[in-house]
Image (cartoon, grey):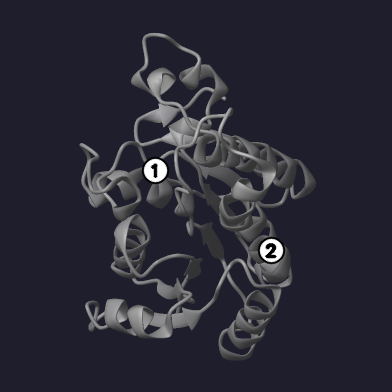
């Protein structure tokens, strides 16, 4: 009997994270639906009654919560094959002239320090996998090339919180990929997807927004690592 692939998706009780959870569970995987609010996590899991989905209480901004989540997964499953660092917040769109370091802390705590906390805590469990994969959910708004290209609409958007946090996450992705050559570690750009993060203004639905993440979550050991991809291919840094 083939062992089920075990995946953890943070921030999975809604939006793209929920869609990724559904799609991976439909592949026959065991998916841990990470949520910082237990009730919302349970409500989301209840929408997937026939799939192998389990709620995992995890607040990526809390060392204590992340450590407790890792201990629970070790006790219940003994390993993790795929970690998807999806939890993220917008943080506002104040310009560089309006935003100070204090205002950035909450955004960075979730979007930058959160993936580091979770990845570090779950490394021992990922090392037990025969094909460990980590997907960092980034954004085209974190691409220096895209946001400085006058032909791209992203270059017209002004904001210090979210774009800079995703640029930082991109560098973190490449550094983990170098440090973990036996892993496949990549960043995904979901594209402009209708979610609560943008007031549901995106032109893509969550299925489309989950495409790049699912692709990177399901690659084999001969797949790419240290890259940045959207649903159609590589994204410039």
> Which residue: 23% across, 82% down?
50
- Relative side of 180 to 136, left or right: right
Crowd around label 2: few <14 · some 14–19 · many ≥20 (10 Å): some
Sequence-first disc among 2 and 1:
2
Residue 83, position in %: x, y? Answer: 55, 62
> Which residue: 50% across, 15% down?
148
Kindly tell me whether residue 52 is visible in this rendering.
Answer: no
Residue 127, position in %: x, y? Answer: 71, 66
Residue 219, position in %: x, y? Answer: 48, 49
Q: Nearer the viewer, mark 2 or mark 1?
A: 2
Q: Picture quarter containing residue 106? A: bottom right
Residue 132, position in %: x, y? Answer: 61, 59
**For residue 174, above or below residue 67:** above
| Camera-nearest residue between 7 and 55 | 55
Element under disc 2: helix
Outermost residue to the right = 179
Q: State the CA–CA distance, disc 2 to disc 1.
A: 23 Å
Q: Which residue is mark 2?
A: 117
| Camera-nearest residue between 53 and 56 | 56
Q: Which quadrant of the figure contains the C terminus?
A: top right
What numbered label is drawn on residue 212?
Answer: 1
| Camera-nearest residue between 196 and 226 | 196
């Amino acid at each position: 009997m083939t062992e089920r692939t075990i995946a953890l998706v943070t921030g999975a009780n809604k939006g793209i994270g929920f869609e990724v959870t559904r799609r991976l569970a439909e592949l026959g995987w065991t998916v841990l639906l990470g949520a910082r609010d237990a009730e919302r996590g349970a409500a989301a899991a209840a929408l997937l009654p026939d799939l192998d989905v389990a709620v995992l209480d995890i607040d990526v901004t809390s060392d204590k919560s992340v450590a407790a989540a890792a201990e629970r997964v070790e006790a219940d499953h003994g390993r993790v094959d795929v970690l998807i660092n999806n939890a993220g917040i917008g943080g506002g769109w104040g310009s560089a002239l309006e935003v100070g370091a204090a205002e950035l802390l909450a955004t960075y705590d979730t979007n930058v320090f959160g993936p580091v906390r979770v990845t570090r805590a779950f490394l021992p469990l990922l090392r037990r996998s025969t094909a460990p994969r980590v997907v960092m959910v980034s954004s085209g708004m974190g691409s220096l090339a895209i946001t400085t290209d006058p032909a791209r609409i992203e270059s017209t958007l002004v904001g210090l919180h979210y774009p800079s946090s995703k640029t930082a996450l991109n560098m973190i992705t490449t550094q983990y990929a170098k440090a973990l050559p036996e892993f496949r570690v990549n960043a995904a750009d979901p594209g402009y997807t209708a979610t609560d993060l943008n007031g549901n203004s995106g032109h893509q639905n969550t299925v489309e927004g989950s495409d790049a993440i699912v692709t990177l979550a399901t690659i084999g050991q001969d797949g790419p690592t240290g890259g940045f991809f959207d649903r159609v291919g590589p994204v410039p840094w």
